[in-house]
Amino acid sequence: MRANPTWQQDVWLDPSAFENLDHVFHTLFDDFCDADEPERYLGVSLRTEEEVALMRELGITLNAAAAEAPNDTDAEYLRAPS
């Protein structure tokens, strides 16, 4: 569901929805692992080298989207072409 653009628009841009984009970022970068340096989470929250590689790619993509969202709004993140 996190990779579904329609779901993202419906949930992340709805202020009454429980989950928001900020929550997703904090989960990926603070709670679950560090998407900037996922290697150290292999065997902790990531099970395989493939998961590490995918998380690294996700971190790169999310950081690129953040660079394209100068006002740090969910709508800007979702419009970013990254």
Image: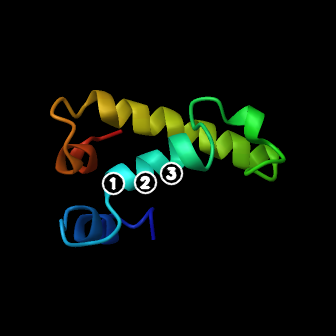
Residue 21, label in figure: 1
What amino acid type should be assigned to the residue bearing mark 1? Leu
Is residue 47 left or right of 17 when viewed as pictured? right
As helix, strand or loop, the secondary structure at mark 1 comes to: helix
Q: Are marks 1 and 2 in contact (CB under 8 Å)?
A: yes
Please give the name of the residue rendered at 33% of the width and 36% of the height, measured from the top-left corner: 65
Q: Earlier in the sequence, mark 1 or mark 3?
A: 1
Pick the residue in front: 9 or 38. 38
As helix, strand or loop, the secondary structure at mark 2 comes to: helix
Residue beneath disc 2 = 24
List x then y, in percent, for residue 13: 20, 62
What amino acid type should be assigned to the residue bearing mark 3? Thr
List x then y, in percent, for residue 63: 41, 32
Image quarter where the C terminus lies is: top left
Please give the name of the residue rendered at 33% of the width and 71% of the height, measured from the top-left corner: 7
Pick the residue in front: 82 or 26. 26
Is residue 27 left or right of 49 when viewed as pictured? left
Q: Is residue 55 above or below residue 12?
A: above
Spatial CA span between label 1 and label 3: 10 Å
Q: Is residue 80 above or below residue 15?
A: above
Spatial CA span between label 1 and label 2: 5 Å
Residue 27, label in figure: 3
List x then y, in percent, for residue 81: 29, 41
Q: Are marks 3 and 2 in contact (CB under 8 Å)?
A: yes
Label 2: few (<14), some (14–19) or many (≥20) C-alpha neighbours in 10 Å:
some
Spatial CA span between label 3 and label 2: 5 Å
List x then y, in percent, for residue 76: 19, 43
As helix, strand or loop, the secondary structure at mark 3 comes to: helix
Label 3: few (<14), some (14–19) or many (≥20) C-alpha neighbours in 10 Å:
some
Label 1: few (<14), some (14–19) or many (≥20) C-alpha neighbours in 10 Å:
some
Please give the name of the residue rendered at 19% of the width and 68% of the height, measured from the top-left corner: 14
